[in-house]
Image (tube, helix red, strand yellow):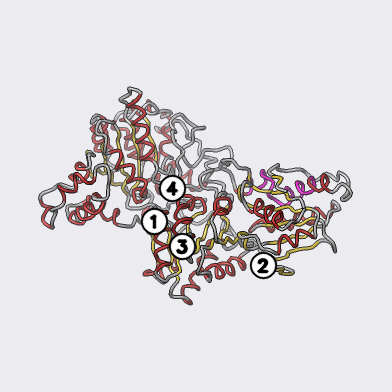
């Protein structure tokens, strides 16, 4: 029996002799390498926190002591030590989530898989404990990458103001988020690893603290005279202690004895404490340690020995098409610059960054700053392209609205992983953007249906200099080209299945394939249809209401939440144009979707060809009783429909 299999709870872990812990750590790493290379998932981050997680669960009594994992992708070891050792369906339907999950365990408190939130959660939990008369400590585990997010520093500012609340902040410092952590804060954490460079840390501290409302002004006076020679008189922890935060470290994050000692001291302190742990992302797996790009941050299923993919990609990805086209644009237009938020590789900017390093800005996990900085770049005469995952643009909505749109600035937002992403669960599905962005005046939004349209619409977007533009595309491989048979206004007609079609199917972006399949299935049911791709879905093209007027039913199909999205906008446009044709909206249910494969979710939500056909046929039989063949029996898959007209 392995040592790991004997640990089914933190109590079992605490009962182990200290001498057995190195063996346990080795078994955990072997387990992770074997399991995660089979399923795919976040491998490098979890290999780096094995000893740290063991020490946390030996010193703290979870779930009584609340442990909050920032982002949560590094919680696999935590799952193993809290009774979850079946990783056979990790990130798949019916298997373990790739993040903390309240449905899985009482040890999972926060499902916070967007970064930089853990310290705010911990601040609130510590306040709640104090008000309820509890002195149980709260623990927040946050990476150096997440500390580049401004929200983390807002939380630190408030945490430091209360010196009697037990709160332990564990900084997992591996110098990386996805890829190497960048920015001033990263440099200053590096300065804490050595005495050299501490001068730069104090210099940054002066600038930051004088703008910090709660505790900054009082201590700024003490730091005001800091000069080059002060590094010889002050220890690195002085800055944190001036903030009211006890500092322990740096600690070797792979030394179990040192970790337990530091965490035990922190637990007993009775106030806010920072425990600074130095870890190695990918620790114990040489291919990960040698991968300079991202230390195997997240992998698809691979052979653990050769590191080759188990199932090679069967085509090019949407991300790579974008990256190649932006690189070409960069060669043509020296005013084009690229911005991302700690996601240079995942969003396809590596090639642009290599060719134009001075025109590429990775701002760390700081989406709000990315967008506001883009506004400044545009004001300065450049055209910024801000590339992020669709779900992460939510964090910078105010900047899109008030800093870019209000000033009519030419900034292009490229939203990767839009719509259903699947395996990473609710927090990563990019199903909100076409609803949220509908309210932004002047903003133009494109949803390409194939690689050719992505290239064309990216160029169209970057040509706009007086308004924000958005180009969104899904995760995965681009399908075959979908040619248009005609263009009316800005709307592409993809298919007509009769001389006078009755149903207008409006396909948004990558749903074009499903809509085309549906039109052919509907023809077998006796319903004729026109399939169109509006290309630019915001604002609604004036040609679309005119097209709708020639049909008896309009059905919109979008890989986005049904509420307030493209279908709603199309229905409003028809009403404004006095086109009295019923509109039915197909899209994703307005709920937090669990983790599963993208195809599984699309099937379940009725956004496949069969699902779209079945729902459309049901509408048509109700609204057009004189048409169609009676009850031919298309399977009615999905009920994700909205009556908007």
The residue singled out by tag 1 in the image is: 369
Image quarter where the N terminus lies is top left
Q: CA distance from mark 2 to mark 1?
A: 34 Å
Cα distance in 3D space between marks 2 and 3: 26 Å
Give the numbered dot on residue 43: 4
Q: Which residue is mark 2?
A: 490
Q: Residue at x 10, y 52 (%)?
A: 232
Whichever of labels 2 and 1 marks the residue nearer the N terminus, that label is: 1
User: Which residues lie in the magenta part?
Assistant: 599-618
Residues at badges 4 and 3 in contact (C-beta under 8 Å)? no
| Mark 2 crowd level (few <14, some 14–19, many ≥20, 10 Å Cα) | some
Looking at the image, residue 129 sits to the left or right of residue 272; the answer is right
- Can residue 255 be seen by looking at this rendering? yes
Residue 356 lies, in percent from the top left, at: 40, 71
Instruction: Single out the residue that lies furthest toward the top.
Output: 133
Question: Quick check: can you spot residue 287?
Answer: no
Query: Element at badge 3?
Result: loop
Residue picked out by circle 3: 407
Q: Is residue 610 magenta?
A: yes
Residue at disc 2, secondary structure = loop
On screen, residue 236 versus residue 52, left or right, reads: left
Instruction: Classify 54 as above or below 333.
Output: above
Task: Relative to 299, say whether 83 is above or below.
Answer: above
Q: Residue at x 64, y 58 (%)?
A: 510
The residue depicted at 28 percent of the width and 32 percent of the height is 19
């Amino acid at each position: 029996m392995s040592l790991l299999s004997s640990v089914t709870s933190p109590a079992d872990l605490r009962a182990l002799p200290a001498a057995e812990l190195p063996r346990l750590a080795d078994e955990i790493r072997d387990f992770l390498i074997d399991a995660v290379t089979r399923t795919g998932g976040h491998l490098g981050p979890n290999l780096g926190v094995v000893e740290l997680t063991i020490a946390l669960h030996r010193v703290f009594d979870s779930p009584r002591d609340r442990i909050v994992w920032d982002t949560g992708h590094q919680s696999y070891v935590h799952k193993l030590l809290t009774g979850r050792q079946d990783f056979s369906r990790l990130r798949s339907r019916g298997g373990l989530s790739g993040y903390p999950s309240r449905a899985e365990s009482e040890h999972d408190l926060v499902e916070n898989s967007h970064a930089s939130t853990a310290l705010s959660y911990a601040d609130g939990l510590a306040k709640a404990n104090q008000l309820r008369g509890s002195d149980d400590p709260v623990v927040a585990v946050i990476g150096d990458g997440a500390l580049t997010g401004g929200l983390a520093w807002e939380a630190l500012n408030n945490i430091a103001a209360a010196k009697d609340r037990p709160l332990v902040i564990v900084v997992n410092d591996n110098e990386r988020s996805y890829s190497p952590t960048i920015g001033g804060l990263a440099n200053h954490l590096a300065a804490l690893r050595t005495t050299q460079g501490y001068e730069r840390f104090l210099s940054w501290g002066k600038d930051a603290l004088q703008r910090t409302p709660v505790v900054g002004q009082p201590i700024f006076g003490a730091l005001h005279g800091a000069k080059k020679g002060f590094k010889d008189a002050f220890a690195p922890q002085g800055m944190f202690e001036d903030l009211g935060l006890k500092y322990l470290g740096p600690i070797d994050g792979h030394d179990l004895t040192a970790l337990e000692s530091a965490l035990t001291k922190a637990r007993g302190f009775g106030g806010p404490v920072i425990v600074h742990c130095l870890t190695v992302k990918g620790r114990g797996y040489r291919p990960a340690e040698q991968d300079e790009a991202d230390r195997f941050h997240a992998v698809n299923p691979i052979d653990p020995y050769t590191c080759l993919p188990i199932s090679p990609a069967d085509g090019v990805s949407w991300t790579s098409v974008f990256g190649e086209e932006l690189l070409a644009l960069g060669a043509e237009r020296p005013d084009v610059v690229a911005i991302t938020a700690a996601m240079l590789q995942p969003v396809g900017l590596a090639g642009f960054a290599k060719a134009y390093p001075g025109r590429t800005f990775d701002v760390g996990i700081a989406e709000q700053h990315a967008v506001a900085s883009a506004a400044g770049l545009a004001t300065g005469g450049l055209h910024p392209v801000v590339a992020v995952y669709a779900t992460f643009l939510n964090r910078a909505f105010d900047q899109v609205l008030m800093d870019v749109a209000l000033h009519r600035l030419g900034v292009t937002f490229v939203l990767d992983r839009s719509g259903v992403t699947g395996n990473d669960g609710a927090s990563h599905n990019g199903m909100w953007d076409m609803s949220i962005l509908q309210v932004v005046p002047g903003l133009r939004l494109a949803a390409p249906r194939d690689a050719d349209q992505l290239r064309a619409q990216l160029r169209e977007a970057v040509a706009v200099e007086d308004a924000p533009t958005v180009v969104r595309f899904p995760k995965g491989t681009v399908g075959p080209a979908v040619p248009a048979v005609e263009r009316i206004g800005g709307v592409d007609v993809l298919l007509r299945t009769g001389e006078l079609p009755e149903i207008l199917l409006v396909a948004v972006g990558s749903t074009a394939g499903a809509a085309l399949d549906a039109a052919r299935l509907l023809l077998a049911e006796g319903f004729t249809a026109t399939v169109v791709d509006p290309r630019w879905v915001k604002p609604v093209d004036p040609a679309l209401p005119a097209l709708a007027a020639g049909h008896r039913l309009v059905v919109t199909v979008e890989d986005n939440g049904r509420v307030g999205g493209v279908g709603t906008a199309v229905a409003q446009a028809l009403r404004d144009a006095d086109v009295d044709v019923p509109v039915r909206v197909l899209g994703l249910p307005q709920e937090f979707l669990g983790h599963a494969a993208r195809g599984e979710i699309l099937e379940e939500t009725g956004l496949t060809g069969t699902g779209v056909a079945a729902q459309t046929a049901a509408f048509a039989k109700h609204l057009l009783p004189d048409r169609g063949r009676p009850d031919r029996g298309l399977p009615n898959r999905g009920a994700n429909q909205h009556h908007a007209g």
